[in-house]
Image: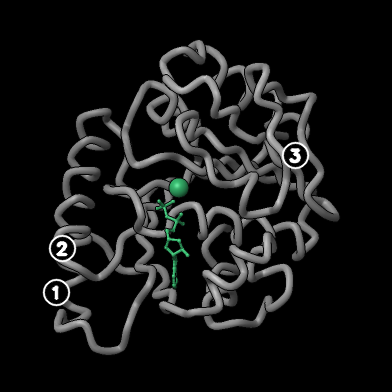
Amino acid sequence: MGAHIVTVVAGRAGAGTSTIAANLAVTLARTGGGPVCLVDIDFTAGDIATMFDAEADDDGVPEAHVATRLGRGLYAILAPTVLGDPSRVPERIVSELIASLSTMYAHVVIDAPATINKHVVTALEYSHQQILVTTAERPALRALGRLHDTLDLLNHDHRLRTVVVTRAHPETGLPATDVERAARAPIAAWLPASPDIPVSINAGQPLATVAPDHPFCRPLRDLVP
Ligand SMILES: Nc1ncnc2c1ncn2[C@@H]1O[C@H](COP(=O)(O)OP(=O)(O)O)[C@@H](O)[C@H]1O
Ligand SMILES: [Mg+2]
């Protein structure tokens, strides 16, 4: 038995990746399918600690046995960000983390930065599912196209990819069919733009912890098998 490993990543920063990773981890923990570990591999500017009002241990490299408890059935490996340069975190750290975590948890949700560095490549390599995040805007969709190209170059199977549109508005000037064509896949979920997201981030409590039936949170239940 091993964990279902999912990496959440976008073609460009600011799309809403960390928000989705955090709320997905909370949602999976709530559904009771076993313990969940949320892993922040943004070693430059990891946001997961702040999103849960938690404290990262900035002294060391992340280790599987020093997970932070975030809630019932929910743990996190927070990113030490004082290291500054992510390349100072040895390459093997992410593969070792995933190997250990997959024996300890039912789900491992990895929050990746938009820069595809060696840590992200490693996470993607070990993932059973790659959730690709975009907004319904042409620059983001173009960046998503480049991310698809990168994954193709790395020989990743298309079937591992799940495309999610976030910060969706009913009227963006781009018809859904155009978004799907640009996304090169059917859209697995359209997560709405909502002021409740920044409010929840400022409260240090992901929305799914307090409002699991919110239109942003509910579709997350069906993203992961
Ligand atoms: N669905 C949403 N509705 C409104 N604001 C959002 C939504 N998703 C993300 N945001 C905002 O966008 C910003 C970037 O989100 P974040 O998840 O940190 O992006 P990324 O990890 O892709 O850089 C955050 O400040 C957050 O408040
Ligand atoms: Mg992020």
Does the numbered disc 1 mark a residue whose Cβ is under 8 Å from ligand 1?
Answer: no
Q: Nearer the viewer, residue 157 or 80?
A: 80
- Ligand 1 image position (quadrant): bottom left
Q: CA distance from mark 2 to mark 3?
A: 35 Å
Which quadrant of the structure image shows residue 217? bottom right
Residue beneath label 1, please? 178
Write the residue at 34% across / 77% down: 168
Where residue 105 is drawn, which disc sits there? 3
Compared across the picture, whether 83 is left or right of 186 comes to right
Q: Position of residue 111 (x, y in %)?
A: 51, 43
- Is 160 rendered above or below residue 151? below
Which quadrant of the structure image shows residue 59? top right
Q: CA distance from mark 3 to mark 1?
A: 38 Å
Q: Nearer the viewer, residue 127 or 57?
A: 57
Residue beneath label 2, please? 182
Write the residue at 61% across / 64% down: 202
- Is 114 rendered above or below residue 202? above
Which quadrant of the structure image shows residue 106? top right
Compared across the picture, whether 15 is left or right of 36 comes to left
Q: In the structure shown, which secondary structural element does the residue marked by tag 2 occupy?
A: helix
The amino acid type of the residue labelled 3 equals: Tyr
Where is the C terminus found, in terms of image quarters? bottom right
The amino acid type of the residue labelled 1 equals: Asp
Q: CA distance from mark 1 to mark 2?
A: 6 Å
